[in-house]
Amino acid sequence: MAERASWSLGSALRGIFGAKTIDDDTWDDLEAALITADFGPGVTEEIVEQIKAQVERYRTTDPRDVQRMLREVVEERLAKYDPTLRLTERPAVVLVVGVNGVGKTTTIGKFARFLRSYDRSVVVGAADTFRAAAVDQLATWAERAGVGIVRPEREGQDPASVAFQTVEQAKRDGTEIVVIDTAGRLHTKGGLMDELGKIRRVVEKQAPISEVLLVLDATTGQNGLAQAEAFIEHGGVTGLVLTKLDGSAKGGFVLAVQEKTGLPIKLIGQGEGIADLTGFTPHVFAQKLVG
């Protein structure tokens, strides 16, 4: 286990690109590195074939050319999706969805701080009323981020009514952005999606919904994506937030998840601190991933 934990795509690639020449081992090692980094078998095969074709076309034998080609291919594929957050409405309403345990509530606190750093006024709505701990946790993060919070008036209050009150308060106070926490688990998936639908309908009576952001834990990779499929299918998701993207061991998941869902990554979290959530820039990410 320790060996797996210390593996990183960066060091695996350095070994490949530092070799004297391009040979069969180059391709075997590159394929193994990309699969280990959670690019997924389909994407890995396409990338390796694309680079092989370029190597043949340019008749190069220098592994450093493979590095440049890999960086360009990854960046080009990442850049097919637009990572821009669409928050021009006033108030701009953002619903944050995802299964419990992915760091959804923490992410909302960090997102609020991110928006405050651009001098936007923000209020968060604690509409995950099924978990009292979630409400308290969100209140702590809201305080850290320096933003207001609308809490349920009583335990188990209807989530849609909390969402309604949050938007209502934002309109009254002239707050620019509303971020609403939603439940990550109910007794049935159908119930959860119905609940989300209800929140949407109630909010849209007062203001359009600008973004529905799905939070995914990068360390769970493809498994986490399978758990979140109901949200993608029924939740009207407009963008992804990847948390716990520390190191490059799961870096390939960033590309795989966009291609699998057809949804852009809009924010990435690369640490535990409140300022560790940032916008997603394909060029910078490809550079860091491949070197």
Image (tube, rainbow, N blue to C red):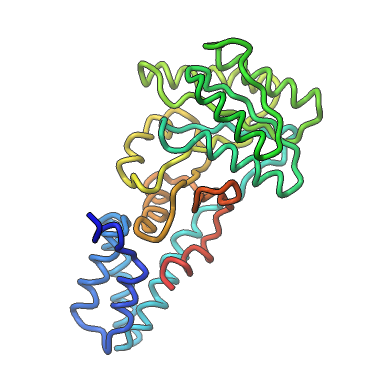
Where residue 219 appears, x then y in whole percent?
36, 48
Left or right of 94 on screen, residue 22: left
Question: In the image, is residue 128 above or below residue 101?
Answer: above
Where residue 60 appears, x then y in whole percent?
32, 88
**Residue at left offset 51%, top offset 61%:** 282
Left or right of 22 on screen, residue 212: right
**Residue at left offset 67%, top offset 31%:** 178
Where residue 31 appears, x then y in whole percent?
25, 67
Quadrant where the image shows the N terminus: bottom left
Left or right of 150 on screen, residue 231: left
Quarter of the image where one finds residue 261: top left
Q: Nearer the viewer, residue 1 or 31?
A: 1
Q: Nearer the viewer, residue 198 or 53?
A: 198
**Residue at left offset 75%, top offset 26%:** 170
Where residue 76 appears, x then y in whole percent?
47, 65
Quarter of the image where one finds residue 126: top right
Question: In the image, is residue 267 above or below residue 73?
Answer: above
Question: In the image, is residue 262 above or below residue 2?
Answer: above
User: What is the count of numbered marks?
Assistant: 0
Quadrant where the image shows the C terminus: bottom left
**Residue at left offset 42%, top offset 54%:** 254
Q: Nearer the viewer, residue 107 or 65?
A: 107
Left or right of 14 on screen, residue 87: right
Q: Nearer the viewer, residue 91 or 150?
A: 150
